[in-house]
Image (cartoon, coloured by chain):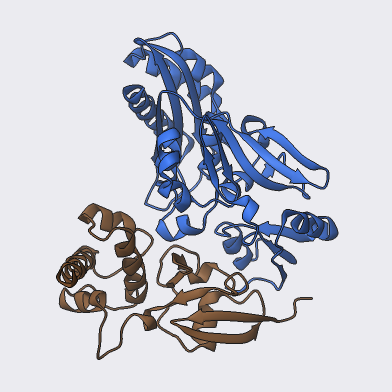
Amino acid sequence: MIPAAFDYHRPNDLNGVISLLQEHGDDARVIAGGHSLIPLMKLRMAEVPHLIDLQSITELTGIESGSTIRIGAMTTQADIIDNASLASSAPILKEASLQIADPQVRYMGTVGGNVANGDPGNDMPGLMQCLDATFILRGPNGEREVKARDFYHAAYMTEREDDEVMVAVTFDAPKGGYAYEKQKRKIGDYATAAAAVIISKDGSTCKEASIAMTNLSDTPVFCAAASDSLIGTSVSAEDIKNAVSSMIDAIDPAEDNRGPVEFKKHAAAVVLSRAIERAWQRA
Amino acid sequence: MSGKMQIKLKVNGEDHEFLAEPRELLVHALRERLNLTGSHVGCETGHCGVCTVTLNGKSVKSCTMFVAQADGAELTTVEGMGSPDNLHVLQEAFREHHGLQCGYCTPGMIMRAAKLLEEIPNPTEEQVRFGMAGNLCRCTGYQNIVKSIMAAASEMNSAKEAAQ
């Protein structure tokens, strides 16, 4: 499978990327790891006359972790898995990254590509909503910030403008317990259903909770009602059931080759129950 | 639009330079230009791993990379691992433990396994299975592939100990 012909650009800095995006408009797209875009180009479902490779832009890589965490858009899943400091300040990133695709793909796949692509099957968007992360976008007029919870409009439709580049994600180091639980048909597959959960406790009651779901709607789903329903409870089996039922009201899965709607709701309930239990044990 | 571009690759220690369209896939450049036909073309969609090579120290699927992206890179393919008279430890272990049947997936298996044993020199069986998850085999059921990689790991570790 050979894609349509394109011109290849490999600028050395972000200004170079942005001026190419301005010059070529809809005809240009940036490529990070390429493991979503290249298969689409090979199938000729995407035609990209000007391909702008971000690999030489060093300011897009790197992980700064402390009380606030900043991950450059070109940081790969393999980089996240190998970063000991990040594994201790925000271990949910490693837990989720290990469930993405396979080793070869994780060497190429980036955080920026995963969050910016807008594919409901990607794992990082739901995770970023759970973490209440902020995305940093840079365009011709400089940088702006968009909350992960406001970024996704529909499948492949996001807040990012055509002449903007995803630069980094930032979030406060999460407190308490965490879990990323993913149900998939086989290793390397997108989620049938996945849940990201962060819970902190005060004594034996839940102080804060955040829940987001992956691949159960045309966008990731941050479940505010389900998160709030856990606060102040002892996270008993009954409390988990209530949170799961709020989550089911918030999602809108579609039937596809991963199963009918009822099955997806069932899988969503199972992964969320497991994620809450595991996060609570770790809190 | 879309002229050819000058591509430089260092493959198995040897420098190569050629003109290619940027859309050419890395695996085709390796096979058809450099005549390194050990890297196979399987699913062509990034699932099966038969095209796995090492590029700048990473295991990558060469069917899911344009040759333009690889410009300037250093690669190792299965041809850089061993020769028929002098097999690499992993190749010898696959032979010894019958880690293949039809052999189509084997170059990708060898390349990924070699990188895996750099990442984790002394892996558990579970780590081998998880670390090889990007490579599919439709013949063996994986049992003997895992056995071969475990055997190669222990062989490489004892050689290392002996050297110290």
Colour in which the image shows chain B = brown
Q: Is residue B23 left or right of residue A265?
A: right
Q: Is residue B142 left or right of residue A183?
A: left
Q: Residue at x 38, y 82 (%)?
A: B80
Tell me where residue B6 appears, x and y as whole percent. Answer: 67, 82
Tell me where residue A234 appears, x and y as whole percent. Answer: 36, 10
Tell me where residue A264 appears, x and y as whole percent. Answer: 45, 36
Q: How many marks?
A: 0
Colour in which the image shows chain A = blue
- Of the pair A25 and A189, the residue shown nearer to us: A25
Tell me where residue A278 appears, x and y as whole percent. Answer: 33, 28
Q: Residue at x 60, y 48 (%)?
A: A73
Q: Residue at x 82, y 60 (%)?
A: A24
Q: Is residue A53 left or right of residue A192?
A: right
Residue A218 visible in image: no
Image quadrant where residue A96 sits: top left
In this rendering, is residue A157 above or below B57? Answer: above
Residue A24 visible in image: yes
In this rendering, is residue B90 above or below B157? Answer: below
Q: Residue furthest bottom?
A: B85
